[in-house]
Amino acid sequence: MINTEQEIEIIQYLISKKLNQKLLLEIKDHFILQISNLMEEHNEGFQEAFLQTKMNWKSELEMVKADFLSARKITRIEKDILQTRFKKMSVYALVFSLVFSGLLYIKPNLFNDVQILFLLTTLGLSVYNFMRKTMNLNGYFQMSFHPLLLKNFFAGAALIAISCFFFKDVHTALSVMIKPFFLFAAAIQTQLLYWNAKKINVLI
């Protein structure tokens, strides 16, 4: 049976791994269950069972880079969850950008309206994050260098550079190519702010 002091020791260990609160609580329950089983079934003491459990979780709780474009380190288990979330966000953003790019091809004048809508949405979500204290000014500015936005920027810059060879002037290339990447970035930023407001880790 795990007592309060031992549970606090487990929590402190998991806090040192910089896990988000929800994941920390889930892993804590697993730790308590595994430690309790070792203590009861193998007649081990708490420290011995705790050490064995930490060894069992060594790979999942190893600190690794969250993304190759991020300097932040998180546990491997959280990275796997985060990368899965990022893939879903990218798919949603891609669908959004393709649909609206098609719409803008039919009605080019809508682009200004889309920009205004995006600005109002991000402003509203940013204010909401500030009010809930889920984001500060530093986090807001750092969002501009988020891995998903950086990947979009580099991909856009590369594609625009290549496209310049097929257009007579750079202005034409920019006007044609920049809109889908803007829409993708807008969709990503909106999702980042939304999930951050819900206290879901998205590296903000």
Image (cartoon, grey):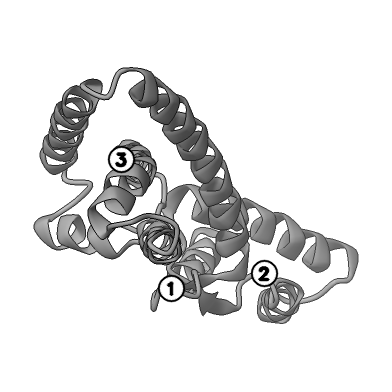
Q: Secondary structure at mark 2?
A: loop
- Per the image, the residue denoted by label 3 is 186
Residue at position x 33%, y 56% in the image: 168
**Image-based side of 16 in relation to 112, left or right:** right
Secondary element under disc 3, as helix, strand or loop, is: helix
- The type of residue carrying mark 2 is Glu
Query: Which residue shows up at 50% across the image and 34% down it?
Result: 92
Q: Which mark is residue 60?
A: 2
Report whether 138 appears left or right of 36. left
State the CA–CA distance, disc 3 to disc 2. Answer: 33 Å
User: Does 172 appear above or below 18?
Assistant: above
User: Residue drawn 44% across and 74% down?
Assistant: 16
Does residue 197 appear in this view? yes
- In this image, 27 relative to 195: left or right? right
Residue 12 lies, in percent from the top left, at 44, 70
Instruction: Specify the quadrant of the image occupied by residue 96.
Output: top left
Q: Are marks 3 and 2 in contact (CB under 8 Å)?
A: no
The image quadrant where one finds the C terminus is: bottom left
Residue occupied by mark 1: 69
Helix, strand or loop at disc 1? loop
Q: Is residue 17 above or below residue 174?
A: below
Q: Position of residue 183 (x, y in %)?
A: 34, 38
Could you tell me residue 142's position as x and y percent? 22, 63
